[in-house]
Image (cartoon, rainbow, N blue to C red):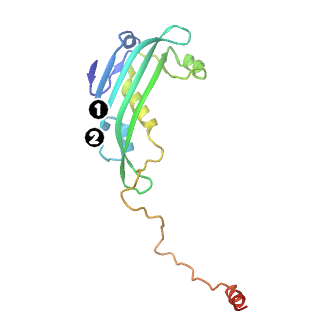
Amino acid sequence: MTEHTHPPYLDVKNAAQASLHLEGHDKLSNYERLTHEAKGLAANNPLHWTALTELRADVSGQPAAWLRLTVTTSLPQICQRCLEPVDVAVQLEREFRFVESEAVAEAQDDDCEEDLLVTSREFDLAALIEDEVLLAMPLVPRHDTCPVNVKMVAADPDFDAPVEKPNPFAVLAQLKGKD
């Protein structure tokens, strides 16, 4: 196992042949798009990642490079219910199979269940980690139970509420009650 802070670039074939096990601890602030999503809230939150590469047989029985990626972090967001900060826990474990070209990936994508990536001598592991964390984020971040009471009514102070008019059928209700 090799310990890193920021994920390295990988030569995918050589890494898979060597069955590399990489692990690291990083900060959200080292990832531009994650920092943007954190909206300036605690961008120094830790991000723990592991990457395991290996050779496994693909559907045709030929050896193929595989990557198992695990990421754990807590991403600061704004709760969409109460508009207060909320830390969204992100834990993901994904497996990817590498293919020789975009054309092969496109041809096999519909027929296979695993995610396909194109083999590279300088595969950007940090970009993959950032992409996967962004995809794992909830569309609407919110607390399980908001720490403040949520105001469910919004009123404009300049809004003049209409004066309540008397119900024209109230007289009929009174007459009906006399019988």
Kind of residue at disc 1: Asp
Residue at x 27%, y 24% (from the top left corner): 4
Q: Is residue 10 visible?
A: yes
SS state under label 1? strand
Q: Quadrant of residue 127?
A: top left
Number of residues whose C-alpha sits closer than 10 Å to that of mark 1, classed few (under 14), some (14–19) or many (20 or more): some
Q: Quadrant of residue 55?
A: top left
Front one among 162 and 21: 21
Relative image position of residue 56 (x, y in whole percent): 46, 12
173 left or right, relative to 55:
right
Q: Which corner quadrant holds the C terminus?
A: bottom right
Front one among 24 and 124: 24
Residue indicated by mark 1: 26
Estimate the spatial distance between the alpha carbons at disc 1 and disc 2, rounded to whole Å: 9 Å
Q: Earlier in the sequence, mark 1 or mark 2?
A: 1
Front one among 7 and 66: 66
Q: Is residue 33 visible?
A: no
Q: Which corner quadrant holds the N terminus?
A: top left
Residue at x 48%, y 75% (from the top left corner): 158
Residue indicated by mark 2: 44
Query: Label for residue 106?
Result: none
Residue at x 33%, y 18% (from the top left corner): 21
Residue at x 60%, y 20% (from the top left corner): 111
SS state under label 2? loop
Front one among 49 and 148: 148
Q: Is residue 1 above or below residue 31?
A: above
Q: Residue furthest top?
A: 62
Kind of residue at disc 2: Asn
Relative image position of residue 9 (x, y in whole percent): 35, 21
